[in-house]
């Protein structure tokens, strides 16, 4: 009898694995994951630090300007927009892009001129940095648009600032000349100490700038957006009531199982935000145990659809202050 029960549970787990994994197939998930993939490759190719999912305050509009990522190396800055487009892309006379086909085949989507948008983001970033005490030389923030999706197709000749999939695949750290084509020197040549000081201050400003919340799912999937709340049994939501962005900066899910099967309960570890130190490293960690069916309610960026992720499908959640 026990053999039959174990076999039935194994079959159930396989069915769920192959047919009930909708949380990992959404466009919002793949687009956010593509951002981090691009950031990782840029860091690997050119060194430095990539800051992903920034939400820079725009003083002119009293709103926040979304920036996919900013790459900072020694004395160099580049603002990068990532377009994870799947389909055939044409460009209209006004500069907007029209993508036909896509992941849903017969769909057609129009995007405002991506390069113009990145240039606007760079302008907002430059003003923000100046307000925080870092002034860059005029015109020394470079802009790029990266298209990392292998299913991107076009007959259009893009400007050099647009990196198509074919060009992206061949991006290699073989020469400093390639790097200089991506970014320009961002600091004046007033001495090494001054440049190092400016670089450190720039890194601190970007490291402490507002960003999107982040959910890291299994299978290396990532979603950027805004954490809203927990949903589940009353006793579980009460156990999680102390997890608020004003207090907590990171949530980790510790999962245990028997014979490879999903547990009915799991451990949630959360670290308190430490406002005394630079950055947001947690100074204290607490732990609660809740049902694995408890859900995180999340609003993905660039989407009007709210998502719910079971804690059993999550590795971690990072909260912006």
Image: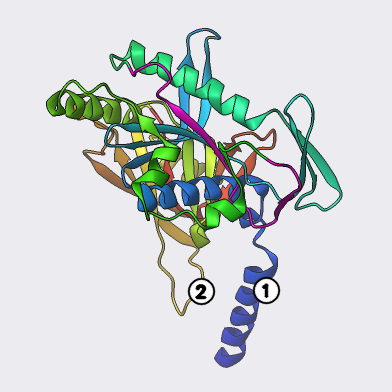
Taking the magenta stretch, the answer to whether it contains residue 141 is yes
Badge 2 element: loop
> In the image shown, does 163 or 67 lie closer to the viewer?
163
> In the image shown, does 169 or 189 lie closer to the viewer?
189
Report the residue that reaches farthest toward the top: 60
Report the residue that reaches farthest toward the right: 106
Where does label 2 land, which residue? Answer: 261
Measured in 3D between alpha carbons, the distance from the residue under mark 1 to the one under mark 2, in whole angstroms, is 13 Å
Badge 1 element: helix
Taking the magenta stretch, the answer to whether it contains residue 169 is no
**Which labelled disc corresponds to residue 273?**
none
Q: Quadrant of residue 276?
A: top left
Residue under the point 34% across and 18% down: 137
x, y (%) of residue 59? 48, 9
Q: Earlier in the sequence, mark 1 or mark 2?
A: 1
* Left or right: 210, with 190 as reference point: right
Looking at the rendered image, the quarter that the C terminus falls into is top left
**Which labelled disc corresponds to residue 15?**
1
Residue under the point 44% across and 31% down: 211
Chain part drawn in magenta: 136-157
Q: Quadrant of residue 93?
A: top right
Q: Quadrant of residue 113?
A: top right
- Marks 1 and 2: CB-CB under 8 Å? no
x, y (%) of residue 254? 38, 58
Q: Is residue 51 visible?
A: no
Looking at the rendered image, the quarter that the N terminus falls into is bottom right
> In the image shown, does 3 or 314 lie closer to the viewer?
314
Q: Is residue 44 above or below residue 72?
A: below
Q: Is residue 246 visible?
A: yes
x, y (%) of residue 44? 36, 53
């Amino acid at each position: 009898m026990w053999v039959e029960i174990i076999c039935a549970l194994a079959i159930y787990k396989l069915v769920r694995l192959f047919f009930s994994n909708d949380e990992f197939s959404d466009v919002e998930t793949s687009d956010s994951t593509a951002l981090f993939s691009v950031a990782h490759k840029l860091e690997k190719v050119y060194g430095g630090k990539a800051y992903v999912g920034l939400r820079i305050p725009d003083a002119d509009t009293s709103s926040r300007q979304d920036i996919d990522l900013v790459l900072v190396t020694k004395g160099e800055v580049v603002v990068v927009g990532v377009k994870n487009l799947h389909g055939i892309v044409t460009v209209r006379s006004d500069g907007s892009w029209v993508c036909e086909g896509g992941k849903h085949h017969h769909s057609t989507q129009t995007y405002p001129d991506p390069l113009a948008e990145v240039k606007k983001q760079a302008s907002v970033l430059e003003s923000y940095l100046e307000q925080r005490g870092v002034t860059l030389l005029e015109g020394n923030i470079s802009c790029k648009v990266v298209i990392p999706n292998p299913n991107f197709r076009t007959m259009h000749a893009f400007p050099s600032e647009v990196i198509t999939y074919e060009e992206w695949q061949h991006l290699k750290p073989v020469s400093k000349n390639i790097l200089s084509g991506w970014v320009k020197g961002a600091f004046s040549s007033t001495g090494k100490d001054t440049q190092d000081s400016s670089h450190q201050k720039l890194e601190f400003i970007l490291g402490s700038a507002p960003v999107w919340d982040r959910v890291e799912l299994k299978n290396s999937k990532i979603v950027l957006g805004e954490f809203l709340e927990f949903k589940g049994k009353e006793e579980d939501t009460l156990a999680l009531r102390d997890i608020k962005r004003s207090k907590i900066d990171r949530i980790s899910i510790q999962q245990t199982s028997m014979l490879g099967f999903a547990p009915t309960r799991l451990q949630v570890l959360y670290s308190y935000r430490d406002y005394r130190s630079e950055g947001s490293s947690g100074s204290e960690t607490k732990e609660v145990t809740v049902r694995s069916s408890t859900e995180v309610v999340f609003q993905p960026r660039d989407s009007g659809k709210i998502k719910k992720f079971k804690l059993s499908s999550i590795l971690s959640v990072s909260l912006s202050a």
